[in-house]
Image (tube, rainbow, N blue to C red):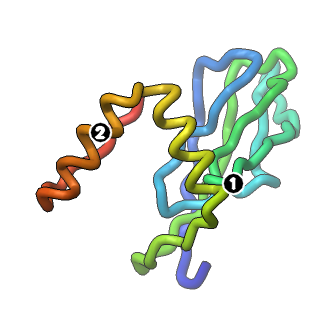
Amino acid sequence: MEKAKDITITLPKIGIKTKLPKLLATEIIVERVKGIKKGEEVPLTVDISPMREGLVNDTKDCKELMYSIEMDEVPSTMKELTAEEYSKFKEKFIRENGQEASVQIASRVARGNRFIFRTN
């Protein structure tokens, strides 16, 4: 990324598996994913999905998780998705939100409405 800045995030309560929250236009800096155990940093392995989401499958009994994301200071256009990546995203979205949510969004887009996705 050109003209990027780093943001470090600490998650105070984590489970064995932990998804790394991030903004859409950011990248997780894999080398900086660490667990905090008894005041010491422990390197953790993170899996990055095709949608650029991060998941730590084993937090090694750490109580906190610390990681950094890189954010482009100049807004960029969205990365082109392959048909396979889009299909995986759509299947996951429908599985998590139901077919009805997909139909509602499609009808809003057809009418030209703007909306914001909110995740928990």
Q: CA distance from mark 2 to mark 1?
A: 24 Å
Give the residue displayed 21% in from the left and 49% down from the top: 115
Dot 1: what SS?
Answer: loop
Q: Nearer the viewer, residue 11 or 22?
A: 22
Give the residue displayed 47% in from the left and 56% down from the top: 24
Residue 103 image label: 2
Please tell me in which quadrant of the rendered image residue 13 appears.
top right
Q: Nearer the viewer, residue 72 or 85?
A: 85
Residue 27 position, x and y percent, is 62, 60
- Image quarter in which the N terminus is found: bottom right
The image shows a total of numbered marks equal to: 2
Give the residue displayed 17% in from the left and 56% down from the top: 114
Depth check, mark 2 against mark 1: the one in front is: 2
Residue named by callout 1:
50
Q: Is residue 43 above or below residue 40?
A: below
* Dot 2 crowding, Cα within 10 Å, few <14, some 14–19, many 20+: few
